[in-house]
Amino acid sequence: HAKILYCVRMEMEMEMEMSQKIPKLGHNMEKDITTHPHSPPNSSYLSNSFQDNKQLLQQWFQQKTSMVPISNNNDVAPPPPLPRILILDGGVSTHLESMLLKQRRANNEETNESVFTHRKLWSSSLLLTNAGKDAIRTCHEQFYTAGADIASTVTYQCHYLVCHDKEEGKNWKECNVDSMLRDGVSLAREAGRNVLSSSLCGNRRLFVAASIGCYGAALADGSEYCGNYGVTTDQLYNFHFQKTSILLSSSPDILAFETIPCVEECIAILQVLQTLGKKEVLPLTSVWLSLACCNGTQLNDGSNVVDALKVMNEMDPNGWMLHGIGINCCSFLHVVPLVQLIVQNMVESGIKRALVFYPNSGEEWDASNETWVKGTGCTSPKEFASLLSKAIGAVDDTWNEVVKSGKVGSSGNNCSGGCSNIPIVVGGCCRTDPSTISAIRGMVDKL
């Protein structure tokens, strides 16, 4: 652990040193463009350092006034504060799969074999080849162009357990996984620069969320859908600590702990954040944890969502480590009741965090034929966006109802008041694609 923390600290010091060398707003624009070859001539966004971007995002998560650099150059407008609702991308892995299968069919190639060469790494296996990296970069660009503010890295199922696999462990070293994790963040960064330089996104800030999947996803046996791992909290801690530390060294804007199906794993993740916070290697990085739920009240392992929320509140009562909570990869049918449950808990506990929700399409999977069942779920981008609109509306409605009832907690960072103003991150998970995100973008822009 000491070795990993030392490496993370060194890389972050190098990043801060480099960020100080990057021209700030108000400097000569020709100099800015030279420093950032991908910057469009009129963009005031890429001339900011990563540190400025990360600080702005963390202020947003913590519901503070967004302080942004003010330009001394009258020709360069300062970037606006972030809106209340940010849009995450969709099902990156399932979209990659669809992209690559379409490419195979166009080339008259065999389509029966998986486009992901390593089952236990799933889409992360694309990080092993240049062609795979190109596909990942293109995928991120498509989601950004469709309207996503945040890209999630293709590292959900990238993990170190593969190094200890009985069959394939001899072919793997931990440094191989280190490189894959860092490449995942770098590719998302590159995609953002490419999109901004093409002026397809206009004047926007684009962010990168480092995806950290649950322990069950690494087992590649569907354990994330039941949450019964049969391992100790210490084992879960070690699993997440190593991966989180390396991802931090790549300086993502967000750490996204995703599809967490059990309370025990929530405890392990909070312990990891406590360690990293004490070692001061968690600077300006926003963190969210999203739960995997089987219905409107329970996690995938059958425990109650409120039990997971209670653990988070007890271990981080001021919201200093965990800036956002929510749900992902559950059916869109459960989103509204889960949002209501989480908001109610915020008001009653007095602990306010950003709310994150990105459900899947709800389509059924035919395991025997390894295909999605047609006619199930919500495959219409417009309808999916409409359902998320109802969930967004439920945030303030629920807040106001609970406040009116008088059940307002006095601890934590205080939730008293008649208006929630909870920051919201909304997007899609499995089987949602850029067309879905485009529909969500259109819906959010009209709110």
Image (cartoon, helix red, strand yellow):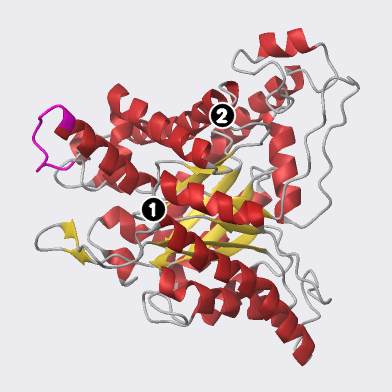
Q: Which mark is residue 446?
A: none
247 is higher (above) or lower (below) than 348: above
Q: Which residues are magenta?
A: 106-114
Residue 46 vs residue 74, the one in the foreground: 74
Neighbourhood count class around disc 2 (C-alpha, 10 Å): few under 14, some 14–19, many 20 upward: some
Q: Are marks 2 and 1 in contact (CB under 8 Å)?
A: no
292 is higher (above) or lower (below) than 94: below
Q: Is residue 109 magenta?
A: yes
Instruction: Name the dominant secondary structure of the magenta segment.
Output: loop
Q: Position of residue 108 (x, y in %)?
A: 10, 29
Q: Position of residue 75 (x, y in %)?
A: 85, 19
Q: Which residue is mark 2?
A: 200
Which amino acid, mark 1? Thr
Q: Which residue is mark 1?
A: 432
Which amino acid, mark 2? Leu
Q: Is residue 437 magenta?
A: no
Residue sitting at 37 percent across and 74 percent down? 300
Residue 159 vs residue 254, the one in the foreground: 254
92 is higher (above) or lower (below) than 48: below
Q: Position of residue 443 (x, y in %)?
A: 58, 56
